[in-house]
Image (cartoon, grey):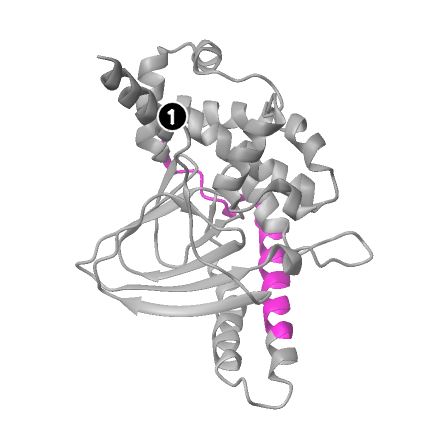
Amino acid sequence: MKDSKTSTDRTMKNAEFEQYEKTGYLTEPYRIFHLRDCKEQKFDFHYHEFCKIIYFVDGRVDYKVEGKTYHLKPYDFVLVGANVIHKPEIDVTVPYERYIIYLSEGFLAAGNEKGECLRYCFDEAERLQNRVVHFAPESYEELVGCLIRMEQIGQQKEEYMSDMLLKSAFMEFMVLFNRNVIRQPKAYITTAAYHEKVIDVITYIQEHLSEEISVDVLAKQCYISKYYLMRQFKEATGYSIHQYINEKRVQAARRMILSGMPASQACYECGFRDYSTFARRFKMIVGRAPSKLE
């Protein structure tokens, strides 16, 4: 009986530390891929430490982002910010064509004397909690022209000052993209499928990371059975509420530490009650101790 209890405790402890998979890597400030395939591809929920834009050309794809499901249409742009949890569901019976742009946080932080920066579109997506944009038809000639030019320049690495030309093309694309977002504020798609209570929970968690958060508190806030809420949240996001809270707290702490805050302070700012628990979870999720980022 004792062995059974020990095994159960160990299983619960392992489940507590399960995490979303961090995938992909970016060693340059930016990259572009143009892909067209019809192969079996299955993705789990995951995130990246960089930002990503997908330009959907053709195929049948549902994109799940932070509890919402977007049925993509040709010419949609999907905005996936750093540490945003997502996964595509792809119908492999038809070809899937898309451009994928990887963008580092450092590149997007570039701004001008007015205080404008290249990450405006991602900030708007986060504020609105809508991650897909579809512009008016007249917007696409310039934007797609930039994508083609970025792809072509990226294939000419040995040419004279191709790195400068590539940077210029990426900058031009992001400036034009953000201008279209500003001019067309209704371009963000609001027809995603989602469970309203799950989105309420995600919003509450993001706004109260520094506070004590439990499933009981969340269920009370949403006027819903906690068991029903737990099932719906897991179905929509792939993970338990507890795992999601840990992930968001650690990623928030990581940003604070990288911006210069001591790890010991970031620990408490993000809702952890003791440093040892924070350090253990941070290392499991980020891959290194918080002190190694300071």
Mark 1 surroundings: few (<14), some (14-19) or many (≥20) residues within 10 A: few
Q: Which residues are magenta?
A: 167-194
Q: Is residue 50 magenta?
A: no
Q: Residue at x 24, y 19 (%)?
A: 3
- Image quarter for residue 257? top right
- Image quarter for residue 164? bottom right
Q: Position of residue 92 (x, y in %)?
A: 20, 58
Q: Is residue 192 magenta?
A: yes
Q: Residue at x 57, y 16 (%)?
A: 212
Q: Secondary structure at mark 1?
A: helix
Q: Residue at x 62, y 41 (%)?
A: 290
Q: Amino acid at mark 1?
A: Lys
Whether residue 55 is situated above or below residue 36 in the rendered picture: above
Provide the residue designation for mark 1.
13
**Quick one: 292 or 124, which is closer to the camera?**
292
Q: Residue furthest front?
A: 2
